[in-house]
Amino acid sequence: MPFFKRKKQEQQPKTEEQQTVKKEHLLEEIETYQNRLANGDNEDSVPLFNMLGSLYFELEDYDQAIHFYEQSIEQKKAIGKAFTDLVKLYNVKRKQASNAKDHQAVQYYLQKSDELMKLTKDSIRENM
C-alpha cells in the first residue's frame, strides 16, 4: 500500500458547448496572429509561425499546423517547439495514412520525419 501515491483526477469530458467556445476562442487567436503576420509588425516571424502552428495543432487541423511549423523552421533552423511538434504531427499523419492504407502518404511522412531528423542532427553539429 503506497503511502504517497496520488489518485489521478478524472477529467470530465467537455460538453459540446464548452468545445464550441474553445474552438471559437482558438479561431479568434488564429485570426489575431495571422493579422499580425500579414501586417508585418514583427521582423522576426518565427514566434508567430510557432504560435499559429500550436493553435492549429490544438484545433487538430494538422495540415495547417504542419504548414506553419515548416515555415518557422524554414525561417530559423533551431531546435525547439516547431521541431518537437512536427515530429508528433508527422507521426499522426503517418498513422492516419497507414489506417487508410495509403502507402504513398506513409512513405511521404516517413521521408519528412527523416528529413527533420537530419536537420536536427545538422543543427546540433553546428552548435557544437
Image (tube, rainbow, N blue to C red):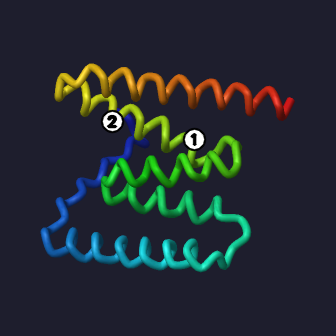
Residue 91, image quadrant: top left
Q: Quadrant of the C terminus?
A: top right
Residue designated by label 2: 93
**Residue 83 disc label:** 1
Q: Is residue 62 above or below residue 32?
A: above
The reply to whether the C-beta atoms of the residues labelled 1 and 2 are less than 8 Å apart is no
> Can you give x and y, in whole percent of width and height, for residue 61 in the image?
32, 54
Residue type at mark 1?
Phe
Q: Quadrant of the N terminus?
A: top left
**Residue 105 disc label:** none
Determine the secondary structure under disc 2.
helix
> Can you give x and y, in whole percent of width and height, for residue 41 in the image?
66, 79
Residue at 39 percent of width and 41 percent of height: 5
Q: Residues within 10 Å of mark 2 (few under 14, many from 20)?
A: some
Residue type at mark 2?
Lys
Instruction: State the CA–CA distance, disc 1 to disc 2.
Output: 15 Å
Mark nearer the N terminus (1 vs 2): 1
Determine the secondary structure under disc 1.
helix
> Can you give x and y, in whole percent of width and height, for residue 11 in the image?
24, 57
Residue at 38 percent of width and 78 percent of height: 28
Front one among 1 and 58: 58
Q: Is residue 21 left or right of residue 108?
A: left
Q: Is residue 40 above or below residue 88?
A: below
Q: Is residue 2 left or right of residue 13?
A: right
Residue reaching furthest to the left: 16
Residue 93, image quadrant: top left
